[in-house]
Image (cartoon, helix red, strand yellow):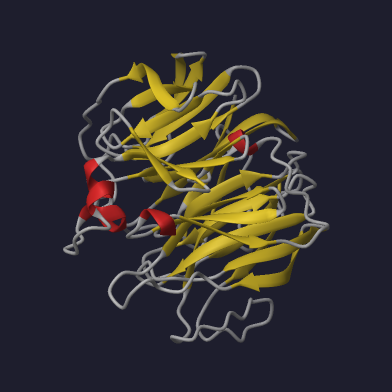
Amino acid sequence: MSSVAFEIDAPPVAFFHSNPYAVVFSPNGSRLAVGTGGWYGGGGVSLVDLQTGRDTTVRFVVPMHAEGVVVAPFDWGERPLTISGVAFDASGDFLSACAWSSGQRPAPAFLFGVAENTLEHLETFPPPPPPDPIFDICTTGLCFLSGRLHLRHNARRLDQVFSSVALPADVDTAVRHGHRAHRRVACAGEELITGGGGSLKLGGWSSLEGETEAFKAAPGLVVGPTARQVAAPSARVTAVLARPDGKLVTGGLEGEVVLWEREEEWRPVKRLRGETKRERPTGDGAWATYHPESVVGLCALEDGRFFSVDASGEVLEWHGDSVARSHVLPRPGTPRCIAVHPETPHGPLLAVGVKVDHPPDHRGYVACFSV
């Protein structure tokens, strides 16, 4: 995104060198971190100062020898990376990023120091070893919890969905506002919660028997660290939000939005929205992962509002359990991530990362809406 200004209009838009797969505001609301990439990599981590519009970008390219580029050793050869998740620690002094390599293959996670709108590479965490020569582990999300960085993977077996690495003691892993960004894994107390079942690498096309059958039979939630499975009233859970009130909200492949509560186990208690069919936007790339109506991101504020976005571009603001208003994307594209903050230099902002596949503009963008 270097040399491209953060335009303050209605809504403000920031363009990136590739497609945004992850967005998160810093704890104090002064910065926006964006993880970008594509099927063939070409991604990076951008840190935008929301007061000045200035940015710092660390790009992951091959060969990895350019100044300011993180060098990541791979036993299987160097590949360009896509940053699939970003998260600040509670202090805002550290930023972690997870990645997949070209073709959604395994890749490391990274820890950066944040100071004066710069990113200093501190550590590289290798990915878990591939389970077999056919199926890879693809990292799609992350969160901080209890002194560790927890990673969420597309994987063939339930026991491979979560992994974690220890972090330096000065990284503040307290979970205070994890609900403000969609990370593809939610923290509810000491539990990790993500969607499972029905996806490409979560049992959807495996010809192997035994270990994948239970996963295919009960699509729903995967709850860690034990990676137990909880059935859901959806063909596939595509987004999970742990709300500040202790309840869960999930989004589904067919546009379902479901409210959950926990007694002895998590259980769905109310369908906030049923299946919602949408026409596929024209000229907007392949739809191998989602349907146009699929809920691809959820986030929440502490005042009772939460926000959902689907792959067709519908951005909804919910007050309690009802839709209060919608936001319209300023340009074509399919959203892939969402975050919100109540106190930025521009007031309360909602940020939506939007993938753009076709000419004339291959660059993805982040649109920010006043909320």
Q: Which residue is drawn at 42% across and 56% down?
A: 159
**For residue 45, which quarter of the picture?**
bottom right
Q: Which residue is drawn at 20% across and 61% down?
A: 206
In this rendering, position of residue 297 left or right of residue 287: right
Locate residue 111, reporting x and y percent. 68, 64
Q: Which residue is drawn at 31% across and 27% down?
A: 256
Examine the rendered structure and indicate whether residue 215 appears above or below residue 72: above
Quadrant in the picture for the N terminus: bottom right
**Residue 162 in sight in this render:** yes
The one nearer the camera, 203 or 65, is 203
Q: Residue at x 52, y 86 (%)?
A: 63
Locate residue 243, reporting x and y percent. 56, 26
Examine the rendered structure and indicate whether residue 18 appears above or below residue 124: above
In this rendering, position of residue 122 left or right of residue 331: right
Examine the rendered structure and indicate whether residue 248 appears above or below residue 97: above
Examine the rendered structure and indicate whether residue 14 appears above or below residue 18: above
Quadrant in the picture for the C terminus: top right
Q: Which residue lies furthest to the left in this view?
A: 207
Image label count? 0
**For residue 220, which quarter of the picture?**
top left
Locate residue 298, reporting x and y percent. 48, 34
Locate residue 27, reporting x and y percent. 74, 41
The one nearer the camera, 190 or 79, is 190
**Residue 297 in sight in this render:** no
The one nearer the camera, 307 or 250, is 250
